[in-house]
C-alpha cells in the first residue's frame, strides 16, 4: 500500500482537483412544504393509531366523568353550557397540548430530531404535520364528549357543527403551545410537567363556570387559548347564538394558533441544530 | 469530495450539582483535518468517547464547530448547514423518530421528506426493502423488531432517495451476519453504480479492516493516524499478538510466566502481549507445556489488527474497541 499517513492527512490534492474541476455539485431536491407536511401528518397519524388510542379513551372518559360530577353542582343554563363546552375542549387540550409536549420533549432528548434535521424538510412541515395529526386525533373524543354532554344536561345539539371550526382552531392553538413547550423544555421531564400543567389549567379554568371564580383566576382564564374555544362553543348552545362573538372567539384561537405554531417552528429550528 | 480543515469543537465545563459531579471542559474534536475522496469507504475508528459522533454531527450540519471548515462537494457546510441534508443521507444511532412507524412507512416517509414525489418514494421503498430482505417485515412497527432488524430498517430509510454521500454511524450494531452482509452489499452496489461515497463510524476493528478503503484513527478528539488499514498495520507488522486466558488466575509461580507479567496488558483473566514472532513462539511453547498449561484456559496467536495499531499509536483507551 502506497498511501502515506502524512500525505493522507495534509495533501488535499485529489479533493482540491475534484473541486476546481467541477465546482460545487448540484444539491438534491428540497422537500416542499405541503407534500412533506402531508407525509409527516400521515406518519404521525399512523403512530397515533397504534400508540394513542388507549389515551384517547382516557381523555374521553375523563371529560365524561367530569360532566357527570358537575351535574350535581350546576343547575342548567349558562353554567351547564360552560361545563359541556369546557369538557369537550379538554379532550383537545389533553391530546394536543399534553401528549404533543411529551412527544416533542422525548424526541428532542433521545436525539430523534436528528432524523428530521438531516432531511431537507422545512421545519414548519415537521411541526405542523405533527400538530395537525395530534389535533385531528382529538376529533372523535371531542364529538363523543359533546354529544354525551348535551344528553346529560339537555342541551340542544343543533349547532354542534361548530365543532368543525372549534377543533382545528383550538387544536392549532393548543398543539402549537404543546409543541413549543416540548421543544423548549431543557429536559423531557420538564416537557411532561409543562404539558400536564397546561392540561390542568385547561381543566380548572375551562370547565369550571367562570362566574364563581375570583378576579385573578378569571384573568388567567382569559390568557389561556383554550378558553376562547370553550366560549365560542358554549355560546352556540343558546337559543339564538350571537355569531359575531362566536367568530370573534374563534378568531382569537386562530391568531394564537398562528403565533404558537410560529414559536414552535422557531423552537424546532433551535433544538435541531445545537 | 469532503474536505475537513482544523475542525475544533469544545464542550464547555459543567458545574457540579447535587448528585452529578462537575465535568471539566472537553475538546471533543481537536483540529481535525481529513480528506475523503469520491467513491471510497472512509472510516472513523476509535473507542467510545473518542469524538467520532461529535465529528460526524459537525459534518452533517447538526452541530456548529467552534473553528475550522467543512466542505462537501464544494459546499461550505459550516456556513450553510442546511445544505448538508441535500447532499448526504445520515444514519444516526437513534431511531426514536421512526420507532412507532411500520418499516414500510418509515422508508416511504423518509423518501418523501428527501424530496421524492409519492410514486417515486414508494417505488424506491419497495426496491430497497427487497434488496435488504425486509419485505417480509414491511408491515411491522420498528419498535416491535429486534435491535438488529430495527437498525436494518433505519438503514433502509437512509437509502431511499439516493445521495452521493452516506454517513453511517455504527450501522451494523446488533445485526446478525446475514443483515451485515446485506448492508455491505447494498453499499457496494451503490458505490459501483453511482460512485457513492461512504463515511462510516465504527469501533469494530474487524469491520474496519474488511470494509474500509481508508481509516482515520481517532483518540481524544484528535486524528492520530489516517491511511489504508493495511498501510496502518505495516507499522506494527513486526509483532504478533498473543492472548492468554487463564482458568482462574495466572500461575505466577512459574518463573517464565511471572517474567511475562510486566509486558502483558491484563484484563481480568486475559493477558494480551505484543511480541516479536520468535518470542511469541517461545511463550506459546511455555504455556502449552508443564505447570502453566494446567492454569491455561485458552490462547490465541494472531497477526496485528487495527486495535494493535491504535494501541501502538498511543491510544489511551484499553477497552474501547471491539473485535466482533
Image (cartoon, helix red, strand yellow):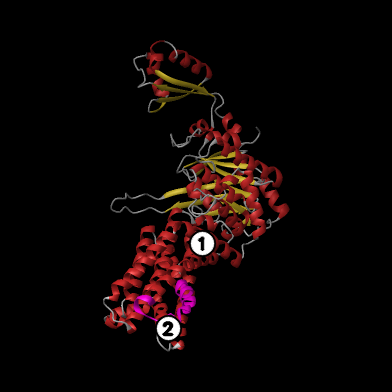
- View extreme (top): residue: B290
Residue lying at 41% horizontally and 25% vertically, measured from the top left? B270
Q: Position of residue B25 (x, y in %)?
A: 40, 50
Circle nearer the viewer, 2 or 1: 2
Residue lying at 51% horizontally and 59% vertically, measured from the top left? A46
Disc 2 designates what residue?
A236
Q: Can residue A254 be seen from the camera position used here? A: no
Magenta span has A266?
no
- Chain letter of mark 1 equals A
- Front position in the image: A156 or B266: A156
Residue lying at 70% horizontally and 47% vertically, measured from the top left? B194
Q: Position of residue A168 (x, y in %)?
A: 48, 73
Q: Position of residue B3 (x, y in %)?
A: 61, 49
Q: Can residue A174 be seen from the camera position used here? A: yes
Q: Quadrant of residue A82?
A: bottom left
Residue lying at 46% horizontally and 21% vertically, measured from the top left? B299
Disc 1 designates what residue?
A45
Above or below, comparing residue A189 to residue B152 in the picture = below
Q: Quadrant of residue B189?
A: top right
Amino acid at each position: 500500500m502506497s498511501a502515506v499517513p502524512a500525505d493522507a492527512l495534509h495533501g488535499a490534492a485529489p479533493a482540491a482537483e475534484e473541486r476546481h474541476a467541477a465546482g460545487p455539485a448540484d444539491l438534491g431536491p428540497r422537500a416542499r412544504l405541503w407534500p412533506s407536511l402531508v407525509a409527516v401528518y400521515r406518519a404521525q397519524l399512523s403512530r397515533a393509531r397504534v400508540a394513542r388510542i388507549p389515551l384517547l379513551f382516557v381523555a374521553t372518559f375523563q371529560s365524561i366523568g367530569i360532566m357527570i360530577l358537575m351535574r350535581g353542582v350546576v343547575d342548567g343554563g349558562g353554567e351547564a353550557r360552560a361545563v359541556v363546552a369546557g369538557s369537550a375542549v379538554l379532550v383537545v387540550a389533553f391530546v394536543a397540548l399534553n401528549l404533543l409536549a411529551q412527544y416533542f420533549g422525548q424526541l428532542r432528548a433521545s436525539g430523534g430530531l436528528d432524523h428530521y434535521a438531516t432531511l431537507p424538510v422545512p421545519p414548519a412541515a415537521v411541526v405542523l404535520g405533527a400538530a395537525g395529526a395530534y389535533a385531528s386525533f382529538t376529533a372523535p373524543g371531542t364529538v363523543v364528549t359533546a354529544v354525551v354532554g348535551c344528553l346529560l344536561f339537555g342541551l340542544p345539539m343543533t349547532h354542534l357543527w361548530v365543532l368543525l371550526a372549534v377543533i382545528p382552531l383550538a387544536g392549532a392553538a393548543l398543539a402549537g403551545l404543546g409543541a413549543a413547550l416540548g421543544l423548549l423544555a431543557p429536559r423531557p421531564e420538564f416537557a411532561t410537567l409543562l404539558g400536564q400543567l397546561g392540561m390542568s389549567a385547561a381543566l380548572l379554568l375551562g370547565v369550571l363556570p367562570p362566574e364563581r371564580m375570583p378576579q385573578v383566576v378569571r384573568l388567567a382564564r382569559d390568557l389561556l387559548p383554550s378558553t376562547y374555544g370553550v366560549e365560542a362553543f358554549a355560546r352556540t348552545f343558546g337559543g339564538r347564538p350571537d355569531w359575531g362573538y362566536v367568530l370573534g372567539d374563534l378568531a382569537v384561537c386562530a391568531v394564537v394558533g398562528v403565533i404558537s405554531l410560529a414559536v414552535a417552528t422557531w423552537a424546532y429550528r433551535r433544538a435541531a441544530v445545537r | 469530495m469532503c474536505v475537513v480543515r482544523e475542525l475544533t469543537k469544545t464542550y464547555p465545563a459543567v458545574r457540579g450539582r447535587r448528585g452529578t459531579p462537575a465535568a471539566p471542559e472537553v475538546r471533543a474534536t481537536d483540529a481535525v483535518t481529513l480528506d475523503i475522496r469520491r467513491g471510497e469507504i472512509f472510516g472513523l475508528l476509535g473507542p467510545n468517547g473518542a469524538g467520532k459522533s461529535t465529528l460526524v454531527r459537525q459534518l452533517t450540519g447538526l452541530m456548529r464547530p467552534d473553528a475550522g471548515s467543512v466542505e462537501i462537494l464544494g459546499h461550505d457546510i459550516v456556513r450553510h448547514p442546511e445544505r448538508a441534508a441535500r447532499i448526504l443521507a445520515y444514519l444516526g444511532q437513534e431511531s426514536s423518530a421512526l420507532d412507532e412507524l411500520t418499516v414500510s412507512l418509515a422508508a416511504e416517509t423518509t423518501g418523501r421528506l428527501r424530496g421524492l414525489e409519492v410514486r417515486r418514494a414508494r417505488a424506491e421503498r419497495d426496491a430497497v426493502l427487497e434488496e435488504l430482505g425486509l419485505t417480509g417485515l414491511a408491515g411491522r412497527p420498528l419498535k416491535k423488531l429486534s435491535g438488529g432488524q430495527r437498525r436494518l430498517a433505519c438503514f433502509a430509510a437512509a437509502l431511499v432517495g439516493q445521495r452521493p454521500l452516506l454517513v453511517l454511524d455504527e450501522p451494523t450494531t446488533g445485526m446478525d451476519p446475514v443483515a451485515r452482509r446485506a448492508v455491505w452489499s447494498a453499499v457496494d452496489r451503490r458505490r459501483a453504480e453511482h460512485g457513492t461515497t461512504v463515511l462510516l463510524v465504527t469501533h469494530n476493528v474487524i469491520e474496519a479492516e474488511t470494509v474500509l478503503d481508508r481509516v482515520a484513527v481517532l483518540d481524544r478528539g484528535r486524528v492520530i493516524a489516517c491511511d489504508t488499514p493495511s498501510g496502518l498495520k505495516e507499522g506494527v507488522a513486526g509483532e504478533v499478538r498473543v492472548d492468554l486466558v487463564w482458568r482462574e488466575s495466572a500461575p505466577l509461580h512459574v518463573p517464565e510466566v511471572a517474567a511475562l507479567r510486566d509486558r502483558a496488558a491484563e484484563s481480568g483473566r486475559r493477558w494480551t502481549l505484543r511480541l516479536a514472532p520468535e518470542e511469541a513462539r517461545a511463550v506459546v511453547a511455555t504455556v502449552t507445556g508443564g505447570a502453566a498449561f494446567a492454569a491455561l484456559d485458552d490462547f490465541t496467536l494472531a497477526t496485528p489488527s487495527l486495535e494493535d495499531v491504535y494501541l501502538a499509536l498511543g491510544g489511551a483507551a484499553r477497552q474501547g474497541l471491539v473485535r466482533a
